Image (cartoon, helix red, strand yellow):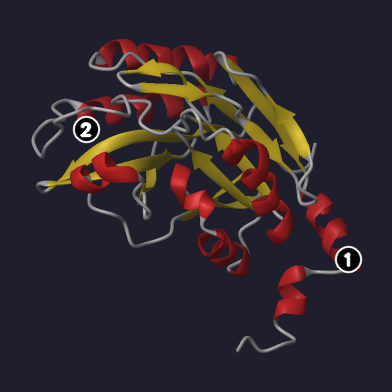
Amino acid sequence: MSGCKLALWQGAGVPGDLPATVAEVARVAGLAAGADLLVFPEGFLTGYHIPGLAPGGLPGVEDALAEVGAIAAQSGLTLVMGTHTDTGGALHNSAVVFDGTGAELGRYHKRTLFGGWEQATFVPGDQPLTFTAGGLRVGVAICYDVEFPELIRAYAREGVQLVVVPTALMAPHDRVARLVVPVRALENQIFLGYANRCGQEPGLDFVGLSCICGPRGQVLAETGTGSAMVSAQLDPAMLAAERAESSYLDDLATFRLV
């Protein structure tokens, strides 16, 4: 079958217990057998909301990431893991990508930090990240990033066919999953995979609603509010067919913005 089989995990790890969370990663990877690409939510490895987090407050995370790479190699999956990282005293909200051999392909650091806690805790990233999985060129964004059309359009203009978005979307912002995500796919005529957390952390109630959208903004797969896996086969011919009649990217090049 042509294209990329994308799987998203909607769930939570065990905040504060890296070995238990790594064990959950291994379990979920087993459920995703047959997929090309598996995406976990924002902050899955470490937990998302960690009040008082400061540089030096993430012991063991790099070792846990090495174990995640080993799981990718054992399963043959390309894997995107949401985690917080500490790089030389600067904290980042990150997504780390491993290929099916376990090699690390890169780290994306969230570029648009949401709310006072994120802005006080993390240093924003300033670079995109792309890789290839299942024959598709894939870009990475994290949660609030997807609410900025400029970031996703920049990926589309660089030839990205799928954007994956590890997410920690909480109540009452479910409108983002229901309305914004399909529009980002439609206006760029790309696939978009939105992998949200579910459950609660102190002061936060995550809404779930993970989904995979196609180039018409159509929902190819979605789930509700509990732990679940979402998957879909993404055929690049679907993108070509959608752009054959009219292409937003091609037509954008024909006029000049004032």
Q: Is residue 210 left or right of residue 4?
A: left
Residue 244 - label? 1
Query: Which amino acid, by three-letter code, is at mark 1?
Result: Ala
Q: Earlier in the sequence, mark 1 or mark 2?
A: 2
Seen in the picture, residue 136 relative to 50 is either above or below; the reply is: below
Q: Nearer the viewer, mark 1 or mark 2?
A: 1
Examine the image and state in which quarter residue 57 appears.
top left
Q: Is residue 83 left or right of residue 16?
A: right
Examine the image and state in which quarter residue 125 appears.
bottom left
Q: Identify the residue at horizontal 66%, vertical 89% (top origin).
A: 256
Q: Identify the residue at horizontal 78%, vertical 45% (top origin).
A: 235
SS at badge 1: helix
Location of the N terminus by quadrant is top right
Alpha carbon distance from label 1 to label 2: 45 Å
Q: Is residue 39 left or right of residue 239?
A: left
Q: Can residue 73 be spotted in the picture?
A: yes
Query: Which amino acid, by three-letter code, is at mark 2?
Result: Glu
On the image, numbered disc 2 is attached to which residue?
62
SS at badge 2: helix
Location of the C terminus by quadrant is bottom right
Residue 54 image offset from top left, x and y in percent: 11, 37
Residue 127 image offset from top left, x and y in percent: 37, 62
Residue 204 image offset from top left, x and y in percent: 38, 23
